[in-house]
Image (tube, rainbow, N blue to C red):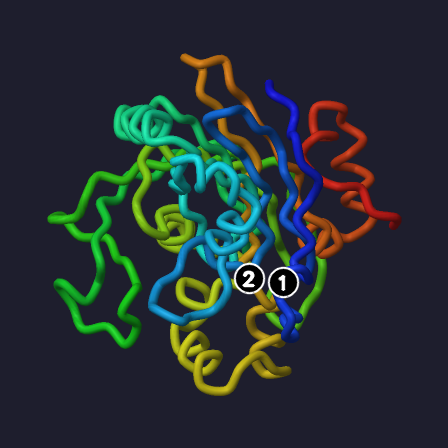
């Protein structure tokens, strides 16, 4: 694996205004002449959704890769994480690399894994979900334009899940939780989030597919507050892109569960989980 050439990007360099949701810098994981892998913090959008919108990962990369861009390079985000999802993002720096990675993505030759904290304990340690997905508003009424749903006319969507750890912790909304490894075989919008909700184990903090979609509308209208905290438990959905690999090119990148999610797992369960050596790379180990 290529070692990163650069240090982390301090977001304060680009954000002169207060941005309390973005809680850490953009870390470089690995880099070559053709591509770059970064660890995107939560609450940072990957790409501009409208002109003159909020600051994004794309804006930061334009600053950092200014030399490459002036020399004829480009910035192409191969996988675009949701705003609240943290973790690995692969960026092509040349047209040739972008084309190669997009073809590999289409042929399902780029493997992706995520970590998710969910409500409830799944009945099986491993399970696979096959529900075709499409945008709900294209077939059914929806208050939320981006919301996806399962439908026979939807695109094929397959996700494999494995339970890594389960624990009990009484909260204002539930007491049983689990940490899951999620491996999407396809790449549909909100795929993991929808599939887990359909399985009866929505991701903790998910404003759209969690306890009630109206919580998302409340958040848009009023912002984060105690009422939302009591129902969602976390200010963002607990989903993290922890591994990407391209076996045909011998590339493999990892990122442990970030501290905002690691801290949410009770200290006793962190110790139990980390006591199994194979789990050590999966989460950061903050002090109990």
Alpha carbon of mark 1 to alpha carbon of mark 2: how far? Answer: 5 Å
- Residue at x 46%, y 52% (from the top left corner): 58
Write down the quadrant of residue 128 in the picture. top left
Disc number for residue 128:
none
Say whether residue 270 is left or right of residue 118.
right
Say whether residue 200 is left or right of residue 266.
left
Residue 22, image x, y percentages: 63, 62
Label 1: which secondary element: loop
- Residue at x 45%, y 32% (from the top left corner): 112
Label 2: which secondary element: loop
Say whether residue 142 is left or right of residue 152.
right
- Residue at x 43%, y 34% (from the top left corner): 93
**Residue tagged 2:** 43
**Residue tagged 1:** 22
Q: Residues within 10 Å of mark 1 (few under 14, many from 20)?
A: some
Q: Residues within 10 Å of mark 2 (few under 14, many from 20)?
A: some
């Amino acid at each position: 694996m290529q070692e990163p050439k650069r240090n982390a990007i301090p977001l304060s360099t680009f954000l002169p205004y207060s941005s309390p949701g973005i809680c850490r810098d953009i870390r470089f994981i690995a880099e070559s002449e053709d591509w770059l892998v970064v660890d995107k913090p939560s609450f940072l959008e990957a790409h501009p959704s409208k002109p003159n919108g909020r600051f994004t990962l794309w804006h930061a990369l334009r600053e950092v890769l200014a030399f490459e861009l002036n020399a004829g390079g480009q910035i192409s985000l191969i996988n675009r994480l949701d705003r609240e999802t943290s973790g690995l993002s692969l960026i092509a720096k040349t047209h040739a690399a972008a084309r190669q990675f997009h073809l590999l993505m289409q042929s399902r030759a780029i493997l992706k894994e995520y970590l998710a904290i969910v409500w409830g304990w799944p009945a099986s340690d491993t399970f696979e979900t096959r529900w075709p997905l499409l945008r709900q508003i294209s077939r059914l009424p929806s208050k939320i334009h981006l919301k996806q749903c399962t439908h026979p006319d939807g695109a094929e969507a397959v996700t494999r899940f494995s339970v890594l750890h389960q624990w009990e912790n009484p909260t204002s909304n539930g007491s049983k939780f689990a940490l899951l490894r999620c491996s999407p075989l396809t790449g549909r919008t909100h795929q993991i989030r929808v599939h887990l909700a359909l399985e009866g184990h929505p991701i903790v903090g998910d404003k759209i597919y969690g306890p009630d979609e109206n919580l998302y509308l409340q958040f848009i209208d009023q912002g984060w507050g105690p009422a939302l905290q009591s129902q969602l438990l976390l200010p963002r959905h607990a989903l993290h892109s922890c591994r990407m690999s391209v076996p045909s090119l011998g590339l493999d990148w990892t990122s442990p569960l970030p501290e905002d999610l690691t801290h949410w797992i009770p200290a006793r369960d962190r110790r139990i989980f980390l006591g199994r050596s194979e789990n050590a790379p999966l989460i950061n180990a903050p002090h109990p």
